[in-house]
Image (cartoon, rainbow, N blue to C red):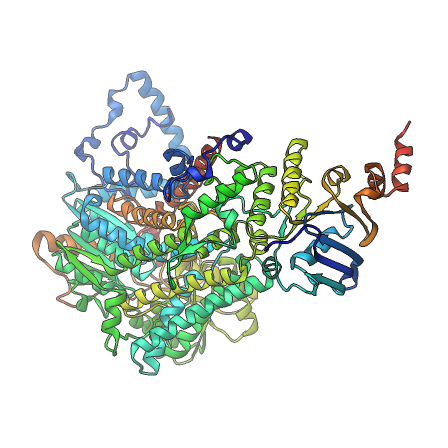
Amino acid sequence: MVTSVGTTLIEMENVGKDYGAIRALSDVSLTVRAGEITCVLGDNGAGKSTLIKIMSGLHQHTSGVMRVDGEETEFGSPREALDRGIATVYQDLAVVSLMEVWRNFFLGSEVRRGMGPVKMLDADGMRRTAREELAKMGIELADIDQPIGELSGGQRQCVAIARAVYFGARVLILDEPTAALGVKQSGVVLKYTARARDAGLGVVFITHNPHHAFLVGDHFIVLKRGRMNLDCRRSEINLDQLTQEMAGGDELDTLAHELRR
Amino acid sequence: MTRRHRPDRATTRPRLRSSPRRDASPPRLRSVPRRDASPPRLRAALAVVLAVTAAACSSSGGREAEEERERAAEAGNAGPPQYTVAFVTHEAPGDTFWTIVRAGAEEAAARHNIELVYSNDPEGLRQANLVQNAVDSQVDGIAVTMNKPDAMTPAVQQAVEAGIPVVGVNSGMDAWQNAGAIMFFGQDETIAGQAAGERLSEEGVSSVLCVLHEQGSVSLEARCDGAASTFTGTIEKLYVDGTNMPSVRSTIQAKLAEDPGIERVLTLGAPFAVTAVQSVADAGSAAQVVTFDTNAELVAAIEAGDVLWAVDQQPYLQGYLAVSGLWLQITNGNDIGGGEAVLTGPSFITSENIDAIAEYAQRGTR
Amino acid sequence: MSDVVEARPGPGPAGTGPGGDDGPRRSMLRQLFLRPETGSLVGAVVIFVLFFVVAGPFRRVESFATITYEASVLGIMAVAVALLMIGGEFDLSAGVAVTTSAITAAELSYQLTLNVWVGVIAALAVSLAIGWFNGYLVVRTGLPSFLVTLGTFLMLQGVNLAVTRQITGTVSTQRISDMDGFGSLEAIFASEWDIGGVRFRTVILWWLLFVAVATWVLLRTRVGNWIFAVGGNEASARAVGVPVAKVKIGLYMAVGFAAWFVGMHLLFSLQTVQAGEGVGNEFQYIIAAVIGGCLLTGGYGSAIGAAIGAFIFGMTRQGIVYAGWNPDWYMTFLGAMLILATLTNLYVKKLAARR
């Protein structure tokens, strides 16, 4: 499916989510456009994961409206979201570490050949495709048969991104892809994130690191205790302001004052 | 030093008693005492050690009693083993009853220069496999318990077809002839149960608790049912978890507390009788304990008057006769029993005849 | 770590030949080390050589047939349990479920005087239902399968005894060997054939077939991929659209199927079933699977490994008797085997990771 840059893919309007009596998210509005990176920033517990769970089909929102391709939608399962081209790469559960790279690449969307009930995996084809697709993203692996757990954290994220791109994702949700990574590895992941955007995907980049967000983001949303605290385009803000917003503005000033001797 | 006052054990008997001897050294060598070769100074030192050791000795029981039995078993035994006999039982590992059966089998094996290969498994299919194992090993004879007749019959027939003489031991009274075994040594559990029932009736009691320590055992059920068939009063069955003694103790105690009218607790294995005595005390009940089968602790309990009597099927005899019977068959074509089962029980052990038996129980043969 | 996988100029994607060539592959040795069953294979060879040297009768073909038979009855269950363990779950009810299945077939046929085929098919339904029940409970409650199946284990153990005693008044089933259908079923589940005077049993062939099918499913089908994924990282598998609940319930039902098969073998080779049997066997299945390289935590293991584990069981069990050793040592020997196999697995995995 070809989407031209700037097309609105997902639109959320005043979306909220209650877990029983607990209000995890309220009145969040955002737009995901093709060829753009939308950064969602926020501290732990700000509601970032609730937001992506709604978009990826793990949870359903309890108020507001979510539109996918302009059509009001509520996903019943991750499979439904995937079928609409919305792929999520989770920080900690991106891959099954004991399984080979190619098996991970095709997990849930295996290619089979043969007929009737005796369909078997097209292992060689999948190996080849996985290697080619990874190479396209600039990832060269010594061995496509090695358990993915042997890869570095950054590479695992990259494989997961390459996989989402290959399977026709139009929206890529990245859940804190750089959180557990060093500077160099983070750089690699940010590079592939930008590549995915250049390929025309709408990217939702979840992070609590304003520096990483500012390197790639086109649009920034800051969540705080389940509410939107900031919603602006790149042209409207600079890194310092973003850091301030993210860290809680005045709170950071106070903290800086306390720490200064 | 302490090792050297028993040189005969340390040098010429490296194996445990239970292992068949396969070294070719003639056993008679053992009678040549090594300590004659030691220098006089050492001999004097040895004498001191021996004297001290003797003074510290217990006059009965202990390891020495066991060794005495070993020496008895070895008397009259000469040369390397000539035959191999497989002894396959349904023992669930660790029951004192089977220790006595095995002791009998091993003594007979030692006397007849037989290499005894003992194996056991409580599950029918796997016990049958062990009989097959014996056939594969081309043993000269097989003694087998047929507790699960349907499972064991094909395996026994296989052995018979291979030309190996088979004798039945302990259980399988109804099945051994059909399977092609040539002798049977054991007790009819129903008859034993009936004997117990008659005795209980004679004692004039009217309420008996029968404690089954295993769910799903045909022979235990037969004992209870046999007793019920001849007993004039009522017998109530109580199932306990025999693998968990503390639970056995509390279950019996609870039952006795609930029903103070119980006059006898009939257990179906010696270890459970000893436990039942404790339960009776715990519950403050007036009931007395009677049981099937014996071991050394139980004999002591009868001597002490804690247990009234025991139905004895003479497990030692079962093991001994099975192996001896096979030896006679192999070497002389004999068979014992004239085609009928040879009954090793029931006989009763009570305070009247306990004195004669206590000594043997002490060394693990009753 | 990173130098292993860092970017290096690989072959051009278009340059690779069709099929076979998958570019740079690990060395043969490393491939071998990475297989879960390698440790158990080494162990099996060592034990085989040990008994071959010390036990004369062990060298006979007849003995090999006996050992393989012993291994096959355990092995059919071990293969199913291995699949389940790769999928990240346990089934403690597997041992008594075998007995339940056999009792169902025997009593249903006998009491209602039906063709034995009817009883056997009903027993299959019951076994699959028990598997479904286990799986459904585990999936729906999210409780550890150890607890859930411990509950089923105790329930079945009680049902086996209670129902059998209630119906028959004793604790073993009636003989059904003279009933319609027994002959044909015996031929399927418990027949024997002679090769040069040595008795081999059909159940060995069934075992090998099941191992082959399980291996094929694991390595070459989509379901196999899902089993590994579900056991390796359930949340991740769910996120990419793997039907986790279906896979797990299916695995429990596979164990149910195996329990049915072994139950039928017992019934048709022994003709009657003891209601109290089967208890404790569930651990033997798990041990065989673990010796064969299955991780207790799931996501890793093999069906062939479980088969080798079962074979180690058979060799040890019978080998000790062939050698004329005191069988009291069997469990000790087995425990040592288990620890050795686990350590070997750990070692080869570390070795493989280092290269």
Location of the C terminus of chain B (image quadrant): bottom left
Which residue does the image show at 46% across and 54% down from the upper left? Answer: A111
- Is residue B246 depicted above or below B195 in this figure? above
Q: In which quarter of the image is residue A190?
A: top right
From the viewer's perspective, tell me whether residue A74 is left or right of residue A133.
Answer: right
Q: How many labels does the image show?
A: 0
* Closer to us: C11 or A190: C11
From the viewer's perspective, tell me whether residue C228 is left or right of residue B164.
Answer: right
- Is residue A194 depicted above or below C193 in this figure? above
- Is residue C207 depicted above or below A240 in this figure? below
Whether residue A83 is visible to the viewer of this picture, yes or no, is: yes
Where is residue A10 shown, x and y percent of the image? 70, 57
Where is residue C303 shown, x and y percent of the image? 38, 51
From the viewer's perspective, tell me whether residue B239 is left or right of residue B37.
Answer: right
Q: In which quarter of the image is residue B173?
A: bottom left
Location of the N terminus of chain B (image quadrant): top left
Where is residue A164 shown, x and y percent of the image? 58, 49
* Closer to us: B106 or A245: A245
* Closer to us: C181 or C268: C181
Where is residue C173 shown, x and y percent of the image? 34, 73
Whether residue B199 is visible to the viewer of this picture, yes or no, is: no
- Is residue C55 depicted above or below C204 in this figure? above
From the viewer's perspective, tell me whether residue A236 is left or right of residue C170.
Answer: right
